[in-house]
Amino acid sequence: MGNSSLSYLPNALVIDVPEIDDQHARLFEQLEAFKASCIEHNAFVSEEAEAIFQILVDHCATEERLAAQAGLDFGRHGDKHRLMLSGIRKRLDAMAHPEADVYGLIRYVEYWFERHITEEDKGLGQQLRQSARLSEGKQFVDSFPAQQSSY
């Protein structure tokens, strides 16, 4: 994980899957930059919001890919991703209205993301690590030539 992003990901949210942890850290870093930009401009910065949304889309695809490679059932987890992306898309689209609350949007994304990591991604990380250990063990066993019985 890059040093600059590492400081944005609390240790309690590290799931010990480097590719996912890197993306989590990058998302938190982008959210902080987005907040600072909104404060600096005293306005919603749509380009940055769309960039964060794309990071989320890419992140969801990464988790789905890793789960598929490990042979894990990703159905319920994927459903939660789709629901979250739909909710965030709706909130982003609502930013066009003058009464829209950009800071409410940021709080929603941060809260959802932290909760999702704690409730879903920690378990996914355990499953991915377990799958990797099983795969490594199988590769280790498979590296031995079949023994011929001489009985």
Image (spheres, rainbow, N blue to C red):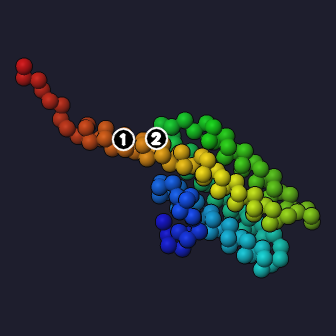
User: Which label number is shown at residue 70?
Assistant: 2
Name the kind of residue labelled 2 in the image.
Ala
The kind of secondary structure element at disc 1 is: helix
Q: Is residue 139 left or right of residue 106?
A: left
The kind of secondary structure element at disc 2 is: loop
Q: CA distance from mark 1 to mark 2?
A: 9 Å
Name the kind of residue labelled 1 in the image.
Ser
Q: For the C terminus, which image quadrant?
A: top left
Q: Is residue 46 left or right of residue 20?
A: right
Q: Looking at the picture, how far across and down is residue 57, in whole percent?
A: 65, 53
User: Which label number is shown at residue 135?
Assistant: 1
Extreme top residue here?
A: 151
Which mark is first along the chain, 2 or 1?
2
Name the residue: 12% across, 26% down: 148
Hey, which quadrant is residue 4 in on the image?
bottom right
**Residue 146 visible to an observer of this rendering:** yes
Residue 75 in the image: above or below residue 98: above
Name the residue: 75% across, 63% down: 106
Name the residue: 83% across, 77% down: 42
User: Which label number is shown at residue 36?
Assistant: none
Extreme front residue here?
A: 12
